[in-house]
Amino acid sequence: MLNIVSAFKGIYHSKELILKLAKNDFWTKYAGSQFGIVWGFVQPIITILVYWFVFDIGFRVAPLNDVPYLLWLMCGLIPWFFFSEALINATNSLMEYSYLVKKIVFKISILPIIRVVSTLFVHLFFLVFIMYVSFLYGFQPNIYNLQIAYYLGCMFFLVLGLSYITGSLIVFFKDLNPLIIIALQFGVWLTPIMWNPEMFNENIKKIIILNPMYYIVEGYRDSLINNVWFWEKPFLTIYYWIVSVIIFLLGIILFKRLKPHFSDIL
């Protein structure tokens, strides 16, 4: 636990630099395209519409507890968009900022954080967007909506821990990036985003909830639709944090051990 406290102390002391570089990273990412940052919003919206058309219009999925399928779908896809893009971006942070890695005075442990924060800007827009959509469907803003901040923090912690692992390994194993993309393609279907986990029996459902993103996706739905507090699911909450803390500790340890070799390889 001391490693986690130390890591977050370092993040706190570097918060201004992280925010400044994250903003620069965000604008630089879209600087070369004619439509700029518009692409950061258009692609997720099109993806949502495609899945909605296929499952709701095409397959005519039955309403889930009288909840519009589009809203239910968005509560799953929007956190997944952030998780997948943040993980990919943070994984490549050391590679793409190799000139900073070679600088002795620069604290390279903040590079994955910069990429995650950069991805967060688009996600914040979609949080406002999904609340607006829920309002259009007749869901009035309430105190449960504030819980989104908790689940966003949970996801930030998880993806940061994973990115310390993947970001460290990709320096030595360049083929890791396509493997992560393949894993994410499977992950979007293994997570109850397009389908309802209640359709399976209890034994299969026990396996499904082992996926940490199950807790996040269901948490977004609990905050915006179901009006359920996270402490009302104590088992899932404890399990999620045990897994996330283990991943984060492994990430910090791996990053520290491989850090002396980064500049030599890059």
Image (cartoon, rainbow, N blue to C red):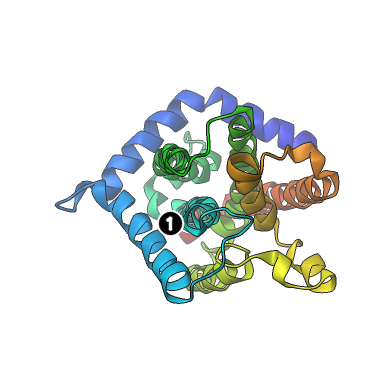
Q: Which residue is denoted by mark 1 in the rendering?
A: 95
Residue 238 placement: quadrant: top right
Task: Where is residue 218? Give x, y as percent.
Answer: 66, 51
Amino acid carrying mark 1 in the image: Met
Q: Of residues 115 and 147, which is closer to you in this image?
A: 147
Decide if residue 144 is on the left or right side of residue 172: right
Q: Of residues 174 and 106, which is closer to you in this image?
A: 174
Residue 47 placement: quadrant: bottom left
Decide if residue 232 is on the left or right side of residue 71: right
Q: Of residues 226 and 178, which is closer to you in this image?
A: 226
Confirm whether residue 161 shows in the render.
Answer: no
Task: Where is residue 96? Give x, y as percent.
Answer: 38, 54
Residue occupying image coordinates x 55% and y 55%: 76
Residue occupying image coordinates x 74% and y 39%: 230
Q: Is residue 100 above or below residue 105?
A: below
Task: Where is residue 213? Give x, y as percent.
Answer: 65, 56
Residue occupying image coordinates x 39% and y 43%: 122
- How many numbered marks have been drawn onto this rendered protein structure? 1
Q: Quadrant of the N terminus?
A: top right
Task: Where is residue 243? Give x, y as percent.
Answer: 77, 53
Confirm whether residue 152 shows in the render.
Answer: yes
- Callout 1 crowding tier (Cα within 10 Å): few <14, some 14–19, many ≥20: some
Say what secondary structure mark 1 lies in: helix
Q: Quadrant of the C terminus?
A: bottom left
Q: Of residues 126 and 173, which is closer to you in this image?
A: 126
